[in-house]
Image (spheres, rainbow, N blue to C red):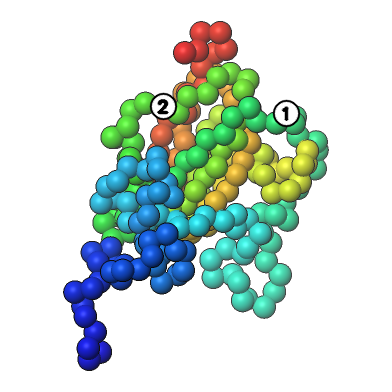
């Protein structure tokens, strides 16, 4: 376009002089780490979800306009009352991160081989886990040794699962009781993502000698 000053475009794609505090779409950055303070600033993190929303009521990708009813996570309910209905005593965020062009996949910007510390839990504690998908594809996140209750508005009949797909840019919340002492795999179930590093060890330490 004649007269456009290309020099005014910043390295991050923002127009110079634009109000950085504004939330207009035009000023939204693809990698605003203030939305994900725990995520490592690294080239392996291509995008940060600017406004992660719960998408468990939405059809999966490509299923929005298929002309028939599509079941969504929010349709699921447990037949029996949940075995542990205590409120969680703490909550943690785990970001699903990656760079699609480089085929790099991680949690919180760190792949498994970079990060040897397990995610610690204490036997019997009830914890809320927020999975935040900062990438542009869905990830089926799987925990070994435990079931969790999806927080999708069904109270003490929340659906119990061990794997949940987190939609692109979206967020999924679940509560679980760390009732199986030991070290357990926690990973994306797209195995090439797991192999690339989107995996961690979850460690449930015995009550009493946990640090
Ligand atoms: Cu994945």
Q: Disc 2 marks which residue?
A: 118
Task: Tell me what residue is drawn at x 23 percent, y 64 percent.
Answer: 11
Whether residue 79 sits left or right of residue 35 in the image: it is right
Above or below for 117 versus 155: above
Q: Residue 86 carries which label?
A: 1
Q: Please provide percent x and percent y for residue 10.
A: 25, 66
Secondary structure of residue under mark 1: loop
Q: Please provide percent x and percent y for residue 80.
A: 80, 38
Task: Tell me what residue is drawn at x 26 percent, y 56 percent.
Answer: 102
Q: Please provide percent x and percent y for residue 50.
A: 45, 58
Above or below for 116 versus 111: above
Q: In which quarter of the image is residue 174?
A: top right
Q: Is residue 153 visible?
A: yes
Q: Residue furthest right?
A: 80
Whether residue 69 sits left or right of residue 115 in the image: it is right
Secondary structure of residue under mark 2: loop
Number of marks drawn: 2
């Amino acid at each position: 376009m004649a007269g456009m000053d290309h020099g005014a475009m910043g390295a991050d794609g923002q127009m110079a002089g634009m109000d950085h505090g504004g939330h207009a779409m035009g000023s939204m950055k693809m990698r605003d780490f203030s939305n994900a303070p725990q995520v490592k600033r690294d080239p392996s993190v291509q995008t940060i979800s600017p406004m992660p929303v719960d998408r468990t009521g939405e059809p999966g990708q490509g299923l929005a306009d298929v002309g028939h009813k599509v079941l969504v996570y929010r349709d699921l309910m447990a037949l029996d009352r949940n075995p542990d209905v205590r409120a969680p005593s703490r909550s943690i965020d785990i970001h699903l991160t990656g760079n699609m062009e480089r085929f790099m996949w991680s949690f919180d910007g760190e792949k498994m081989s970079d990060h040897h510390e397990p995610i610690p839990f204490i036997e019997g504690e009830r914890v809320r886990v927020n999975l935040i998908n900062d990438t542009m594809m869905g990830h089926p996140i799987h925990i070994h040794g435990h079931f969790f209750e999806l927080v999708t508005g069904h109270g003490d009949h929340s659906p119990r699962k061990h794997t949940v797909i987190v939609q692109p840019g979206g967020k999924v919340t679940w509560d679980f009781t760390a009732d199986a002492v030991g070290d357990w795999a926690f990973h994306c179930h797209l195995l090439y993502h797991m192999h690339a590093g989107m995996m961690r060890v979850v460690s449930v330490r015995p009550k009493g000698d946990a640090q």
